[in-house]
Amino acid sequence: MFRKILIANRGEIAVTVIRACREMGIRSVAVYSEADREALHVLLADESICIGPADAGQSYLNRQAILSAALMSGAEAIHPGFGFLSENVSFARMCEACHISFIGPSSEAMALLGDKAMARASARAAGMPVIPGSQDILDGVEDASKAAEEIGYPVMIKAASGGGGRGMRIARTAAELERAYLAARAEARAAFGDDRVYMERFILNPRHVEIQLLGDSQGNVVHLNERDCSIQRRNQKLLEEAPSPAVSPALRKKMGQAAVDLARSVNYVGVGTIEFLLDEDKHFYFMEMNTRIQVEHPVTEAITGTNLVQEQIKAAAGLALSLKQSQLQPRGHAMECRINAEDPRADFRPAPGRIEQLLLPGGPGVRVDTALYPGYEIPPYYDSMLAKVIVSAATRIEAIQRMRRALTEFVISGVPTTLDLQLAILRDPDFIAGNCDIGYMNRKWPQLQAEMEANEEVRVHAG
């Protein structure tokens, strides 16, 4: 097992990895930008090293600085978290060249599956249904226009690297294509340091259902069931749950086996997630694979009783899986609400600022992953997520009720947040009935806005 791990990330995922390391008896090294000098992950780690200025391109995306920090600290492995360099093939290769373990799949497996365009080819080769799209990376606007004419509008232009909804734009007509193409490339370059994009046909209002995978270096691969991530805004997930209300045991088995087969075909090691679109007729289509831990991994932990970050570390250290597929049947229901420093009433404008008051919810079946503390100054340079509230209960309706209770207890002042929006979703009859797809937010926005006003009053009274 590793003795020391460097965490090449920030925020709540860095805190989560530090805690996993401490429980395993592993020393942790935090890296931070100048803007994060007082961040919680810096305060909690056993060691910390500044790697550059606030701009992510000069700090959290600075591969040379991160590797230098790892070598200087004596870290044997690097955990990339999610976002930033977590799916950067060249960074994984640099780690391998420096004899530092990258806590993730091999660079070869990442190149095949972490690169979205190549993953589509691998999925097709494995016999998995794939959304119609371009065969290769798009080489300029003219190439994109030609591909769109062959595929048929509307189309989705997507970043080849990374995830989290970044670098994705819809073009519904030829007139929208150039702007969408250029915007997707620019966002992908800023988020992942890689501006390559490809194209898929845009499927109207499917469900977004993903399968969690875990593999080891001995060739064992298991799936940990599915998560439903259909509640999204502009390709950014807002609320996730497991299991999906739309997936039957037979469909779960079929999707899970397809995901396992694809991972085995490339000798996949570590955690990973295969994302599918599920249409109204319950046909599923491969969309992409995330070769990293995901923001929503806690809902899978809740229904399977696992610690995915610790399992990820064990796999990277060469240990065999201790989990069998038969042990991983879903138990109960779990939900996660992402709480962002955004103002839903002002087109979700990011709202950095100082946390004045903070009271986190608790009680049975409630977990909060966050890097916040009273007096913390939220920097304006990074993702706006403040916290994840995760609840688990015996049934879906009990999980909804528990999440409502938890969110009414959550007190945070100093910046606007998405708390009231999440409560509005949890009170919506269609959500309660499980009638959700990726078009939910567009359809429901007027009703949700009205409900948000009432929720603010409820939370203030409860707090």
Image: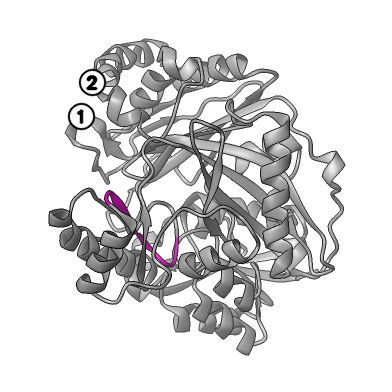
Q: Nearer the viewer, mark 2 or mark 1?
A: 2
Seen in the picture, residue 219 relative to 174 is either above or below; the reply is below
Q: Amino acid at mark 1?
A: Arg
Q: Left or right: where does residue 422 sit relative to residue 15? A: left
Question: Residue at the spot x=20%, y=29% of the render?
Answer: 345
Secondary structure of residue under mark 2: helix
Question: Residue at the spot x=60%, y=53% of the render?
Answer: 273
Q: Left or right: where does residue 375 sit relative to residue 81? A: left
In this orientation, does residue 7 appear? no
Quadrant in the rendering for residue 215: bottom right
Range of residues picked out in magenta: 153-162
Observer-nearest of 114 and 6: 114
Give the residue at the far front of this rendering: 150
Tell me the tag on residue 446.
2
Q: Quadrant of the N terminus?
A: bottom right
Residue 92 is situated, as x and y percent measured from the top left of the image, at 57, 77
Q: Left or right: where does residue 87 sit relative to residue 232? A: right
Q: Amino acid at mark 2?
A: Pro
Tell me the tag on residue 345.
1
Examine the structure image and report whether residue 156 is included in the region drawn in magenta.
yes
Q: How is the image coloured?
A: one colour
